[in-house]
Image: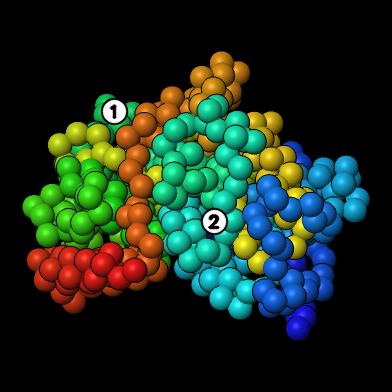
Amino acid sequence: MSSLRIVLGVGRTPSGHRGTGRRRAAAALAAVVCASVLAGCGDSGSNESKGGPEKSNDRGPITLASGKDTTGTVQGQLDRWNKQHPDEKVTLVELPESADQQRQQFIQNAQTKSDAYTVLNLDPIWVAEFAANQWIDELPAKEFPLDKMIPAVVKTGNYYGKQYGIPFNTNAGLLFYRTDLLDKIGAKPPTTWAEMKQDCEKVRKLPEGKGIGCYAGQFDKYEGLTVNFSEAVASAGGNVVDAKGKATVDTEAAKKGLQFLVDGFKDGTIPKQAATYQEEDGRRAFQAGKLLFHRQWPYQWTLAGAKDGSSKVAGKFGVATLPGLAGPGRSSLGGLDLAISKFAKNKATALDFIKFFSNEENARTNLKVTSAAPPYAALYDDPALRKQFPYLATLKDSLATATPRPVVVKYGDATAAIQESTSAALSGSKPVDAALADMQRNLSAAIAEK
């Protein structure tokens, strides 16, 4: 059976963790090409390639299935590959903006054993689930320069000692802040939640700080909420899931982390509208000068610094590591890993494409054009890049202490449990203790289910 697959035009904004955004012209790469393609969709009996990609000699056209590229840079990289490989062209298949919806479409594609998606650009936390369900192939680790990448980032693509995902980029949360306003009150970037609140109170007393929102992150009921909750718990000294794989949200640290967020909405530290913020909602608010502090991925650096009139805070902001309960906080580890669908055709081409798409040259380009955090360790110490992106040292520090979200085979159930209870606490419909008790029970059940 075949079905019509539409390849959408590419817009602009984050790579690494998912976001939304309006379409814009890319700053330094070729313009986006919009097209419609007819992609075959078959069952495993007739279309599934035999064995993994290292055993396949099948070559020909493939697809790259990925979340919305709001940076406008991916098509330019595909064009370079396609020019050199006219018989093995890669077509971009853009999935919805929401990470949860992307995951759903990836799973639907796998469960129907469709060959419509060849290379998958996955949130690293999905790799274990997809590998356990045999929806993606093991990759030949020795054929990739994994020794040049940050070990913790490489580990995101590993499942039971085998490599199923190759890092395309990585990500760690940063605290974006208004340098002009903090300078006015003689303050440095806060390292604790209490300092952040104090700074906000002082700024709001300034004529230029009147009515400004203090702090925002990603608090809509989607994957970003799991990220922000996990960071709050880690930044209070706890873990959502411990080293033995046991749910540990029935702890004092978890309570303090969630209480920080709940109190923020109650006392106005976090604007009420931030309850529906995903990445792009907060970015637009920060760029419009409506926020003093913003928890965000590195991609915001380039967009907030644009001097084309789209950002009111260009030249007026800096970045720091996230604040925590008693000192610097800890970010969740984000990013994107490239994998090959178990049910794809032309896996030999797919393997070579991943080698190209994930190489250091492309990682350097992505950093320069979109501020995407590279997986290659050496790029963080490159003098020229540090001059262009002063936040690289801070990002390196954030990555060094970043923690993965719960590595759970039934990750969909796990993240749903976290989102449901966190959302209930933030909205005030459930007390913090009750929300965490429910989360502990439901998260434990998700972990126990195999």
Q: Nearer the viewer, residue 445 or 296?
A: 445
Quadrant assignment, res 181:
top left
Q: Is residue 284 left or right of residue 333?
A: right
Query: Mark 1 or mark 2: which comes first in sequence?
Result: 2
Up the image or down, 408 lies above or below 175; here it is below
Which of the image's four quarters has the C terminus? Answer: bottom left
Quadrant assignment, res 439:
bottom left
Q: Which mark is residue 122?
A: 2
Residue in the picture at 20% in, 38% down = 192
Q: Amino acid at mark 1?
A: Lys
Q: Nearer the viewer, residue 123 or 419?
A: 123
Up the image or down, 186 lies above or below 422; here it is above
**Badge 2 density bin: few <14, some 14–19, many ≥20, Cα 10 Å:** many
Residue in the picture at 32% in, 35% down = 401
In the rendered image, residue 52, in percent from the top left (x then y), is placed at 64, 54
Which residue does the numbered mark 1 point to in the structure image?
188
Up the image or down, 336 lies above or below 111; here it is above
Q: Which mark is residue 27?
A: none
Residue in the picture at 17% in, 56% down = 248
In the rendered image, residue 256, in percent from the top left (x then y), is placed at 13, 52
